[in-house]
Image: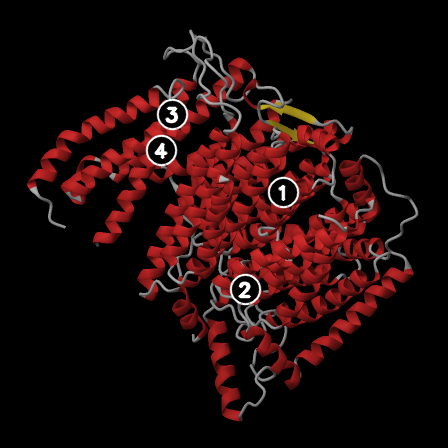
Amino acid sequence: MNDLIILLIIVPFVASFVSLLGRYFLHLCIVEVTSLGAVCLCLAFLTVLFPTIWEGKVIDYSVGGWVEPVGISLYMDGLAWVTSLIGMLIALFSLLFARGEGKYEYNFYFFFSILLGGMEGIILTGDVFNMFVFFEILSIATYILIAYPQKEKSIIASFNYLLISSLGMGFFLLGIVLLYQQTGVLSFREIARLVTEIGRDSPLLTLSLIFLVVGIGVKAAFIPLHTWLPDAHAYAPHPVSAILSGVMIKVSFLAVWRILKLLQAPHLQQILMWVGGFTAFLAIIWAMAQNDSKKLLAYSSISQMGFIIASFGAATSLSLAASFYHILSHSLFKSLLFLSVGVAIYATGTRDIDEMAGLGKKMPLVGIGFLVGALSVSGVPPFNGYVSKSFISTSLKGHPFVHFLIFLASVATVASFTKLSRIFRGRGTKEDTIGNSHKDEKNLSSNYISARMDHMKVVSRGMLIPLIVLSLLCLITGICPRTLAGAISHLLLGKGLKPALLVYSPSQLANSVFILGSGLVLYLVATSSKGKKVLTYLRSLRFGLNNSLLLIVVGFIILVIINWMMRGFH
Amino acid sequence: MKESEIVIMISRKLAPYILLFGLYLISFGHLSPGGGFQGGVVLASGVILLYLSRGIACTQRTFTEKKLGLAEAWMFFFFLLMGVSGLIAGKYFLGNFLPLGKAGKVPSGGFIFFLNLIIGLKVGAGITLVCSCLFKTAKG
Amino acid sequence: MPIYFVIILILLGVWGMVKKDNLIKKVISLNIFNSSIVILFVYLGSRTGSTAPIMEERMKGVAVDPLPQALTLTAIVIGICLTALALSLILRIYQQYKTLSISRIEKSIRNE
């Protein structure tokens, strides 16, 4: 039974070995089936481990037989179990989509399996340097997967991401150096035990924690550290975007969760609440300004991560369960959105929202999938986004300013997804987006669009199956919220939720309707001519590589200063 | 870059010694500074000396990309195999199951010797492959 | 006293990554940054003793801490992989844009 944990990490690496060797004498189908089989095998292991985890036991495993402070040990508790489940599910759907799209070679499956192995390693490990090694394995696989199409924008996006993420990982390594110099051990349990002896308030310990949090925060999209994310997620291939937005930023955030929970720094959690609020608000303003469909989705990912971070920062048991529920629902609907927009881009060959308009008639299934995803992210009742957003706003009631920021972010989310749904509705002319359009220009553009429609590529069934299953999962996780939230809370914290929590109450429903209405009003304001001028200005602000790196250093210094001010002494 | 006769002659005589030194670093990794990765990089630098002195096309006929790629892939497999054999025999992944000898001699330390060997060959093949691809695009 | 030199090296690496215009100089600064963090780690671990931590028949003298040396190896390997990957990406960027200066590349992206 204990061996299943290490097999969860080994099986993706064995699948990657098959892809590596398969380049010389195996057919591509065998490699695809092997990768899918590895993911299904890991899902089977997780099902076998479920009864033990449900009772609240923590499964322990020492690598190589070396006992805890000397060697590396792996833990699986409830948090690790649910995260592995989410990761493997989204990987399964991404691989099915990649198989349906059919233009990926052996290298793609090799790096995808390494990405899965690295992701499992981050969640299951109990040693802080081992977490660094698995983070780097994950990062190197993602750099190569983002640069896979080998167009110039993908390569520049990957290079920017490489430099920014290496700076972040360097900060993480500095944090490990300082932590080791104070405690002398590297495993999480031993550090947690020694921290209570050293004293939680020593300045070097807080400095090392801030280094660690900034290091991982680069990959988890905190606000001054997020600048790599729009380009990287937008110019990557579609299944890679789905797994990056759906899983990788969450796994990085869960590493922050584990570190802060074990080392117990309540000041830092409060600062994270403010970081989350600003992330949620600022990112969605940028999202409304975009014309590129995948960049809009990428900025919306940053904004939803802000929701998750803010709810984690509030630090009550309800807010922790709400944060994890939002992690679960966001991975489901964001992968659904990326994959459905990916089908649309594959069919028409362009990424611009205005050029793709009016696809709903030609591809009804994809349109329904996109509709489910957009309704989930806007927080409309029977879907899971409504449940997790109302949990989050209930748990943040005690902090009025952050609650207001989250409310504004929800309104702006509705507006930006109304803008994105232009892909699937409308008649397909550019008339309502260009301010002034002469008659022959309108005829020319509608001829251009209808000519493009006739040359659309055929969409295979393999690409549609993940969309259907993900939509059903979004619906199911939204219909019975009390059981799912109770299960999550039991797995994470060991106790159930308070029974007096009602999600489908009239006040929550009225709240949701109000947000929907304000969002539509905001959309109408944004598409007026004055609104368009503001949005065009916002779209032209881009961070160069130098400024992005400078922002990381500045963000770190601001975090140190705020922490110092909150404690009153140095 | 025109290679002179002296460089070609000396590098031909020197390259086997560099490879031997790399193998020494790999196999005495648990007794003196060195180990799998360091020895592998020295192995790769021996081959890179041959690239620089004899020309890329000539050396690539001996160390072809297919052979290097296959060597790297099979070494990955052997590493996983040793780990899983530790799982089957000694009940832990990467657990030791060979007898420990006397401290200070080469056969001590169980199967660290084999792990060093596997990693050394894999790193050597890998870095040679990287440099071979980079040199190839530079020329053409 | 030597710890201040190492901290200055770390700050030099960060400054080089932020301010330099040439892409290859950025990669060199990344290498300086990684190497100097590793020097800091080994220096902080080496103050306990004087001999190498390898066990022969008897240990002669107090050994230095072996854990930072193992971690140093891992960090150096990761640094090499990152440098190799960054250099191959720079090669592709150069073939596309014919320049190695990040400001000119960003200007040509902005003008598209």
Query: What whole-number distance in Å separates the C-alpha atoms at marks 2 and 4?
Result: 43 Å
Residue for point 56% across, 58% down: A229
> In the rendered image, which residue does mark 3 sit on?
B35
Query: What whole-number distance in Å separates the C-alpha atoms at marks 1 and 2?
Result: 46 Å
Left or right: A107 as drawn, with respect to A424:
left
Quadrant occupied by the N terminus of chain A: top right
> In the rendered image, which residue does mark 2 sit on?
A344
Q: Are marks 2 and 4 in contact (CB under 8 Å)?
A: no
Q: Position of residue C70 (x, y in %)?
A: 48, 29
> In the rendered image, which residue does mark 4 sit on?
B123
Residue for point 89% across, 52% down: A502
Q: Chain of mark 3?
A: B
Left or right: C83 as drawn, with respect to B45:
right
Badge 3 amino acid: Gly
Query: What whole-number distance in Å separates the C-alpha atoms at marks 2 and 3?
Result: 52 Å
Foreground mark, 1 or 2, reads 1
Question: Camera-side residue: A14 or A200?
Answer: A200
Foreground mark, 1 or 3, reads 1
Helix, strand or loop at label 3? It is: loop
Residue sticking out furthest to the left: B5
Q: Quarter of the image holding residue A297?
A: bottom right
Q: Are marks 1 and 3 on the same chain?
A: no
Q: Are marks 4 and 3 on the same chain?
A: yes
Helix, strand or loop at label 1? It is: helix
Foreground mark, 4 or 3, reads 3
Q: Is residue A40 visible?
A: no
Query: What whole-number distance in Å separates the C-alpha atoms at marks 1 and 3?
Result: 31 Å
Q: Residues within 10 Å of mark 3 (few under 14, many from 20)?
A: many
